[in-house]
């Protein structure tokens, strides 16, 4: 099969280019990451991140035939129609909207900065009990669909609002994490959390385009979380 | 090679659960500490842990007792776990788990609002007399993810200084062998820097990648073990590798023991629940070594499933969609992706798969690395400046077989303990070892060797060969002649890897160079494993030999110590002296 990969090495290339490879997959429906590993055996200068190879560490977010996803859990059959049977090339590019370090590796600093801005840790100043803090199963359920985020950046780098304002708009991933703590019955910093987002950019740049939802490899729904925060902010205003 | 030096009070190499628990402790104390990790911390392998963290917090059973947990752990270890360390882990455990909850870890809950606990293999009440216990604290089947992200968040809050995507290449020691820090490469720029510190903590995790079939992440290449061995630090019980019963056949990805804890069970091609024959009481929740061996027996006796009869099935559909989707959502995802099987409807094809390294750098309960003074059987001495915690360490709480859920507990209990100890030692004044130029030359030799390579075999092909060798000769069942042959093959590979070729010599984000450096470490771990496995002439826990089928307490109720300088196997006494309870004496191990 044919694979076309975005290449750029800052030491030797003035500009990025697409490089074609021929890979023998034996007709198997491999994961995109397996294909990358086969390419690397041919050409060890190809660079990408990977770790868990099972969709839980968030290392290998990339743009696969036009859509952001994790290479390790995207089988060729789902990459794009025609890729598996060789009618079409597999096309791999770095996540859009972040500076490219080399090949498929992007500089995630802006993404992490936004995550840190939402103070992504539990805040509770009451003295801790001798055992755990109690939480009902119903309250615990409120953070399902939020805490599972793996910080892969597939969502934020598919969001036009994030592309335009990566420094001011928190982006879907950070907003999802913000809501993860707002929704946690054990957290007491609701007001401070909301106050920090109460400006035209941090949250209100979200245009509800839902790109984030359609790409999240963990099936999470940042748009819904953003909607909840929006409601909390509006309620707070009155 | 002149390189930049940066100086800290303490450095932690590794941002998994163990490393981040240690760094959190030190960040809170205000000493100048740095955490170095070859991947962004939340991409560490701890993120993959599924089933939970085992600890007697007395939620599922208000009468639960840490001593029962201790009994199970000692028995699970096949009696070569150190009883003082196990006592420490099981008794300090509850406090450590409650701390994690206070930090925000999103545990699943019981109706009473307490932490949800599920049954895991090898767990009992009342010292094996009271039936199956439910002692593994869980956040659905994503406990490692929840734990790792929580620890990262707390480190952010407390201002830990992170060096993410920095690769530690070598331990720097002075002429006396005292640790002075590490040489690490900034992956993004390729720059090598000397991180100088009074305390160096290795928390580099496991090395499952020495086998071709493993549940471990691609980054689990045993770098800490490699660096230790090259610096002359011995490793303990390194022949003890856990094969997890339920790796997905073909893919290697894990489905948690929690599946069987929730009521799933294994069947052979006749649909028989075969564990009832091998472990009449605990059945599918016997120790992992026992279950893995039973599965292999079924397969070898021709009762395996599938066209080649080379796996068995894990049946879960009888638990119902509701339970599967609330308790095991991640497993459902993984099984659909990697086995093309929806557990709600059909069983998952599984096979024993390399999972966990019980052995490692010997330490005491403060995480201080040990070496034997005066050769074999000598007194253990700690190595000034060097600490190890987590899977890379062998403290030893797992002995010859780890119980499920005990690793996450090991990480946080001993990560915390090492942090506390170093904090106090720094307060009282710790020495900084001062390496001279020869020491620095030695520590950077490997970097130069790869950069100077002009031709030779490729890293990928040698890695494959090494993994196949280990898989064939040092798997679930082991045989003397095959192992002798394996040792020879690994020795041959050492020669060839020493002359292998790195094609890409560029600086920026050169992952080919990292993979080459990792191959050196895989080789070190593989060699130590091979020699230790061949040398331990008995069967105990995960180490199971056809030619020595029985446990031999007379000769081998002890740790093995592999000395990298002589490449000889020595012995070290197991600790049988817990401080507050009576010794658990070795018994025949049945489930
Ligand atoms: C699939 C799976 C499921 C599991 N489930 C459970 C479970 O439910 N319960 C349980 O108790 N245990 C479980 N385990 C075992 C447990 O997850 C691991 O033993 C544990 O996470 C290891 O943690 P660690 O902190 O020692 O190392 P890791 O989490 O592996 O982290 C190692 C760190 O070291 C860094 N590092 C390594 N080498 C270098 C280097 N050269 N330079 C810089 N940094 C380096 C890495 O970047 C990483 O940050 C599971 C294991 C697997 C494979
Ligand atoms: S819904 Fe909002 S956050 Fe999501 S992609 Fe659209 S603009 Fe971005
Ligand atoms: S919300 Fe989904 S897509 Fe976005 S970072 Fe988290 S896991 Fe990735
Ligand atoms: S390698 Fe971890 S998510 Fe793909």
Image (cartoon, coloured by chain):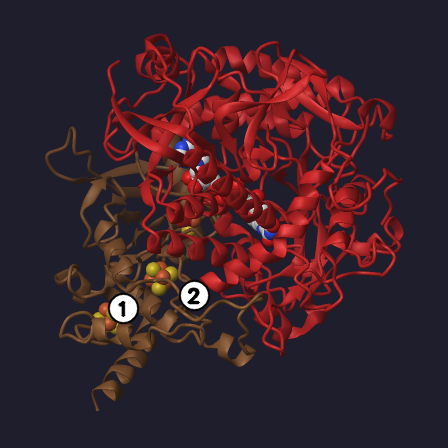
Chain colours: A brown, B red
Query: Is B311 placed above or below A234 here?
Result: above
Quadrant assignment, res B164: top left
- The one nearer the camera, A140 or B537, is A140
**Badge 2 element:** loop
The response on whether ligand 2 sits within 8 Å of label 1 is: yes
State whether discs 2 and 1 lie on one chain: yes
Q: How far separated are the C-alphas under marks 2 and 1?
A: 20 Å
Chain bearing mark 2 = A
Going from N to C along the chain, the mark reached first, 2 or 1, is 2
Q: What residue is disc 2 on?
A: A147
The residue located at (16%, 34%) in the rendering is A10
- Give the image quadrant in which the ligand numbered 2 is located: bottom left
Q: What residue is disc 1 on?
A: A211
Is residue A42 at all visible to an observer of this figure? no
The residue located at (48%, 51%) in the rendering is B47
Residue at the outermost left position: A14
Quadrant assignment, res A201: bottom left
Q: Residues within 10 Å of mark 1 (few under 14, many from 20)?
A: many
């Amino acid at each position: 099969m044919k694979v076309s990969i975005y290449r750029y090495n800052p030491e030797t290339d003035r500009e990025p280019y697409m490089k074609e490879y021929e890979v023998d997959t034996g007709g198997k429906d491999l994961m995109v990451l397996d294909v990358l590993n086969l390419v690397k055996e041919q050409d060890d200068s190809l660079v990408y991140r990977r770790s868990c190879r099972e969709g839980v560490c968030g290392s290998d977010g990339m743009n696969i035939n036009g859509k952001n996803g994790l290479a390790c859990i995207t089988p060729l059959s789902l990459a794009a129609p025609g890729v598996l049977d060789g009618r079409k090339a597999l096309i791999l590019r770095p996540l859009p909207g972040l500076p490219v370090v080399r090949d498929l590796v992007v500089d995630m600093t802006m993404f992490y900065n936004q995550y840190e801005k939402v103070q992504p840790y539990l805040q509770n100043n009451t003295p801790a009990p001798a055992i755990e803090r109690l939480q009902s199963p119903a309250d615990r359920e409120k953070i399902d669909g939020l805490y599972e985020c793996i910080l892969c950046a597939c969502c934020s780098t598919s969001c036009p609002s994030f592309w335009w304002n990566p420094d001011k708009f928190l982006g879907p991933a950070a907003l999802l994490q913000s809501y993860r703590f707002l929704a946690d019955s054990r957290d007491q910093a609701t007001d401070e959390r909301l106050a920090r987002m109460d400006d035209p950019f941090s949250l209100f740049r979200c245009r509800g385009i839902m790109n984030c939802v359609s790409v999240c490899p963990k099936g999470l729904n940042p748009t819904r979380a953003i909607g909840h925060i929006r409601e909390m902010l509006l309620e707070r205003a009155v | 090679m002149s390189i930049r030096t940066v100086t800290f009070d303490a450095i932690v190499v590794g941002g998994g659960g163990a490393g981040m628990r240690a760094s959190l402790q030190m960040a809170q104390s205000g000493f100048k500490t740095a955490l170095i990790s070859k991947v962004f911390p939340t991409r560490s392998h701890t993120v993959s842990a599924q089933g939970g963290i085992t600890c007697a917090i007395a939620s599922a059973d208000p009468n639960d007792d840490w001593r029962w947990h201790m009994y199970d752990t000692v028995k699970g270890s096949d009696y070569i776990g150190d009883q003082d360390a196990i006592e420490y882990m099981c008794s300090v455990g509850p406090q450590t788990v409650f701390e994690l909850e206070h930090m925000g870890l999103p545990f699943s809950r019981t109706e009473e609002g307490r932490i949800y606990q599920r049954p895991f293999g090898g767990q009992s009440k009342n010292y094996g007399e009271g039936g199956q216990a439910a002692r593994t604290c869980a956040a659905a089947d994503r406990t490692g993810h929840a734990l790792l992200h929580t620890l990262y968040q707390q480190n952010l809050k407390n201002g830990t200084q992170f060096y993410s995507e920095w690769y530690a290449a070598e331990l720097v020691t002075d002429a006396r062998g005292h640790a002075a820090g590490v040489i690490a490469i900034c992956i993004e720029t390729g720059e090598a820097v000397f991180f100088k510190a009074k305390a160096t903590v290795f928390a580099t995790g496991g090395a499952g990648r020495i086998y071709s079939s493993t549940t471990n992440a691609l980054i689990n290449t045993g770098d800490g073990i490699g660096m230790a061995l090259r610096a002359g630090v011995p490793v303990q019980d390194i022949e003890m590798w856990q094969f997890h019963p339920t790796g997905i056949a073909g893919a290697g990805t894990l489905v948690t023991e929690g599946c069987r804890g929730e009521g799933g069970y294994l069947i052979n091609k006749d649909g028989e629940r075969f564990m009832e024959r091998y472990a009449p009481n605990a059945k599918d929740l016997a120790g992992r070594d026992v279950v893995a061996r039973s599965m292999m027996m079924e397969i070898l006796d021709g009762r395996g499933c599938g066209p080649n009869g080379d796996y068995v099935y894990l049946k879960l559909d009888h638990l119902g969609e509701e339970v599967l989707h609330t308790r095991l959502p991640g497993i459902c995802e993984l099984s659909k992706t990697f086995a093309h099987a929806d557990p709600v409807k059909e069983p998952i094809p599984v096979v024993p798969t390399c999972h966990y390294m019980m052995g490692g750098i010997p330490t005491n309960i403060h995480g201080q690395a040990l070496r034997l003074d005066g050769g074999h059987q000598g007194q253990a001495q700690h190595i000034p400046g060097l600490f190890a915690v987590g899977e890379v360490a062998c403290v030893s709480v797992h002995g010859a077989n780890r119980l499920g859920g005990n690793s996450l507990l090991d990480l946080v209990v001993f990560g915390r303990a090492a942090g506390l100890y170093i904090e106090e030692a720094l307060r009282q004044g710790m020495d900084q070892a001062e390496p001279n130029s020869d020491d620095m030359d030695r520590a950077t030799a490997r970097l130069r060797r790869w950069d100077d390579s002009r031709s030779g075999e490729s890293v990928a092909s040698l890695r494959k060969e090494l993994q196949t060798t280990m898989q064939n000769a040092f798997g679930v069942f082991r045989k003397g002649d095959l192992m002798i042959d394996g040792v020879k093959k690994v020795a041959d590979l050492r020669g060839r890897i020493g002359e292998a070729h790195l094609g890409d010599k560029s600086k920026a984000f050169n992952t080919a160079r990292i993979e080459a450096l990792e191959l050196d470490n895989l080789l070190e771990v593989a060699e130590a494993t091979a020699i230790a496995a061949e040398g331990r002439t008995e069967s105990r826990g995960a180490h199971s030999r056809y030619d020595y089928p029985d446990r031999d307490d007379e000769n081998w109720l002890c740790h093995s110590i592999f000395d990298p300088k002589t490449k000889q196997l020595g012995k070290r006494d197991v600790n049988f002296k817990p401080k507050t309870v009576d010794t658990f004496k070795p018994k025949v191990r049945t489930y």
